[in-house]
Image: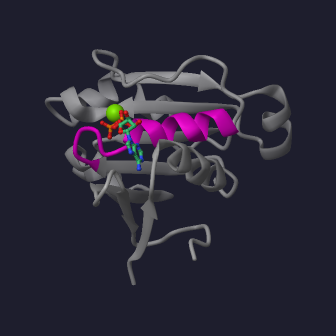
Amino acid sequence: MKKIVRIKNAKEMAAFAARYAGVLRGGDIIGLVGDLGAGKTTFMQGLAAAFGVRKPVRSPTFILMQVFKCSAAVCKKSGIAQICHIDAYRLKDENELFAIGFEDYADRRDTIILIEWADRLPSVQWLDHYQEIRFAYGEDGERVLTADKMPIRTD
Ligand code: ADP
Ligand code: MG
């Protein structure tokens, strides 16, 4: 059964992402799928904040991949030392993902990967530890998130 979560504003999105961060394990790959402005980067920013990332996380316009170091305290507790943020919006071809070094970050116990526009990378969804969140616009600025598997309680 699909899980649906309604998020009222950007602040609530960040809080949701922070809770989501709490159950992630090294090697997890999270696909963020949805239209422009649906909240994918806002989710990534909330998640990065929870991991103590200090560098600002932006919607990468021309950068396809960025790696963010987590704070020492978080690393020590969770074993997660870095977050790899990929924006596949401008990828023309799935092979480009491997050309930018995706495999160096995949399936590592000290790394989690977030991929915006993961629906443009069909083979990624078959990888181990892949999970997907779909983002859609709801009414009055709300965002409606759906996932087949939601690792946190949302009720
Ligand atoms: P995407 O990466 O999907 O293109 P962004 O996260 O960059 O989207 O942009 C979402 C924009 O919508 C931000 O400016 C954010 O402040 C705004 N926003 C308004 N309501 C919400 C909400 N309920 N959840 C997340 N973001 C929201
Ligand atoms: Mg974005």
Asked whether, in this view, residue 70 is left or right of residue 36, the answer is right
Residue placed most toward the observer, 40 or 128: 40
Q: Residue at x 59, y 41 (%)?
A: 47
State the image quarter where residue 117 is shown.
top left
Q: Nearer the viewer, residue 25 or 74?
A: 74
Residue 128: tell me if it is visible. Answer: no
The magenta-colored residue range is: 34-50
Quarter of the picture containing the N terminus is: bottom left
Q: Is residue 123 above or below residue 88?
A: below
Left or right: residue 145 versus residue 49 is left
- The residue positioned farthest toward the bottom in the image shown: 1
Residue 154: image location, x then y, percent: 56, 71
- For the C terminus, which image quadrant? bottom right
Label tally: 0
Residue shown at 65%/47% (left/top)?
26
Q: Quadrant of ligand 1?
A: top left
